[in-house]
Image (spheres, helix red, strand yellow):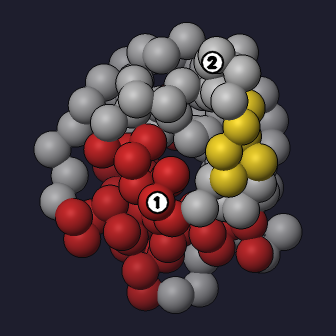
Amino acid sequence: MVAAGMLVVACGGGGGTAGAPQPTSAAGKRGLVLAEQSGCQACHTANGKNSTGPTWKDLAGSRIKLDGGKTVVANDSYLTRSIIAPKSQVVSGYAGIMPGNDLSEDQVADIVAYLNELSSLT
């Protein structure tokens, strides 16, 4: 949101999808729409530019260093957990300011599909 901090509505920052590849699957397209509607791009970019939260570009499948020094792989399980419980594993160097959300299991899966596509299309 790295993953942590994916759905911040009012954290500021210059997020967005400018210059990022667009998803091709139905789930990825739904995930992009949900991310836009939920305000995720207020803190996360899809094009690699720095912002309040980690960029999503090439996030899926990458190794993430967390606060406390632990390193994890940003697999589907990590990405899902980061959306559902954003303060559970905060990316090192970022404030744990992402609030919880009321997304359904299917909506979270669509956002994870979008994040996976961002990594496979670049």
Q: Residue drawn at (46%, 60%), measured in percent from left and top? A: 77
The answer to whether 15 is drawn above or below residue 105 in the figure is: above
User: Looking at the image, can residue 45 be seen?
Assistant: no
Q: Is residue 44 left or right of residue 27?
A: right
The answer to whether 86 is drawn above or below residue 109 in the figure is: above
Looking at the rendered structure, the secondary structure element under dot 2 is loop
User: Which quadrant of the structure image shows residue 66?
Assistant: top right
Q: Residue at label 2?
A: 67
Location of residue 104 in the rendering, given as x and y in whole percent from the top left corner: 17, 60
Q: Dot 1: within a 10 Å radius of its alpha carbon, few (fewer than 14), some, or many (20 or more) residues? A: few
Q: Is residue 27 left or right of residue 54?
A: left
Q: Amino acid at mark 1?
A: Ser
Q: Amino acid at mark 2?
A: Asp
Looking at the rendered structure, the secondary structure element under dot 1 is helix
Q: Residue furthest bottom?
A: 25
Q: Nearer the viewer, residue 107 or 84?
A: 84
Q: Give the quadrant of the N terminus.
A: top right
Give yes or no for contact between labels 1 and 2 (Cβ–Cβ under 8 Å): no
Checking the image for residue 63, the label placed there is none
Q: Give the quadrant of the C terminus.
A: bottom right
Numbered disc total = 2
User: Which quadrant of the structure image shows residue 117?
Assistant: bottom right
The answer to whether 119 is drawn above or below residue 83 in the figure is: below
Q: Residue at label 1?
A: 77
The answer to whether 106 is drawn above or below residue 39 in the figure is: below
User: Looking at the image, can residue 61 be seen?
Assistant: yes
Q: Is residue 93 left or right of residue 89?
A: right
Q: Residue drawn at (71%, 15%), measured in percent from left and top? A: 93
Q: Dot 2: within a 10 Å radius of its alpha carbon, few (fewer than 14), some, or many (20 or more) residues? A: some
Q: Residue drawn at (59%, 61%), measured in percent from left and top? A: 75
